Amino acid sequence: MSTFGLSINANRLSDCYDDFSNPIKAPWGIKAFTGYLGGDQSKWQEYDATKLVKKYTGPALNMLVDQEKADNFYVEGQLLPDNLSAECASNNVPINLRIHEITLEFFDKQSCTLGYDHSYYFIATFIEEHINHHAKFLFQ
């Protein structure tokens, strides 16, 4: 499951997993936007989270973004969460961008780094934290 764009609700929070956060800068996003929205790139900006954060002037936000370091789309430069994080910093929008890498250590001090792909298992690992993140603001 991935988000496409930035979802901001009345409770001023947003969260996402494996976010395509700057699709107008990624090959996959350019192909998709061209197919769905046409060639006028100015129309694409309203669906790009990084561009939306750049022009956001509403109430303070609280964003939670989880990204797996081993995700093929991340490795290939398709997701670009660092672009979103940088734009948030320049616009004073708080973001909790968590880049995950799973390392297992064995009894003999050997370690093995595992990675999630772009799938259910990554989301299942962190879904409770995202639900709690929403609940914290919904039930204030």
Image (cartoon, helix red, strand yellow):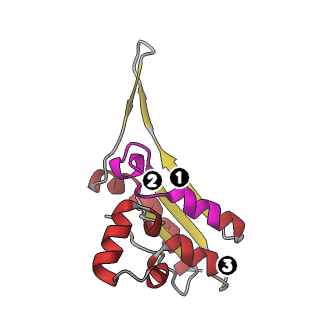
Q: Position of residue 78 (x, y in %)?
A: 40, 57
- Callout 3, which amino acid? Ala
Callouts 2 and 3 close, C-beta under 8 Å = no
Mark 3 Cα shell of 10 Å, populated few (<14), some (14-19), many (≥20): few
Mark 1 Cα shell of 10 Å, populated few (<14), some (14-19), many (≥20): some
Residue at the spot x=33%, y=44% of the render?
Answer: 116
Nearest the camera: 47 or 26?
26
In this image, 2 relative to 83: left or right?
left
- Figure check: 13 above or below 104: below
Taking the image as drawn, is residue 101 in sight? yes
| Highlighted magenta segment, given as a residue range | 67-87
| Quadrant in which residue 54 is drawn | bottom right
Disc number for residue 67: 2
Q: Position of residue 48 (x, y in %)?
A: 47, 74
Mark 2 Cα shell of 10 Å, populated few (<14), some (14-19), many (≥20): many
In this image, 69 relative to 93: left or right?
left
Residue at the spot x=37%, y=51% of the render?
Answer: 125
Callouts 1 and 3 close, C-beta under 8 Å = no
Disc 1 to disc 3, C-alpha distance: 20 Å
Helix, strand or loop at disc 1?
strand
Disc 1 to disc 2, C-alpha distance: 6 Å
Helix, strand or loop at disc 3?
loop
Q: Write down the residue under mark 1.
A: 98
Residue 38 belongs to the span the image colors magenta: no
Residue at the spot x=29%, y=80% of the render?
Answer: 36
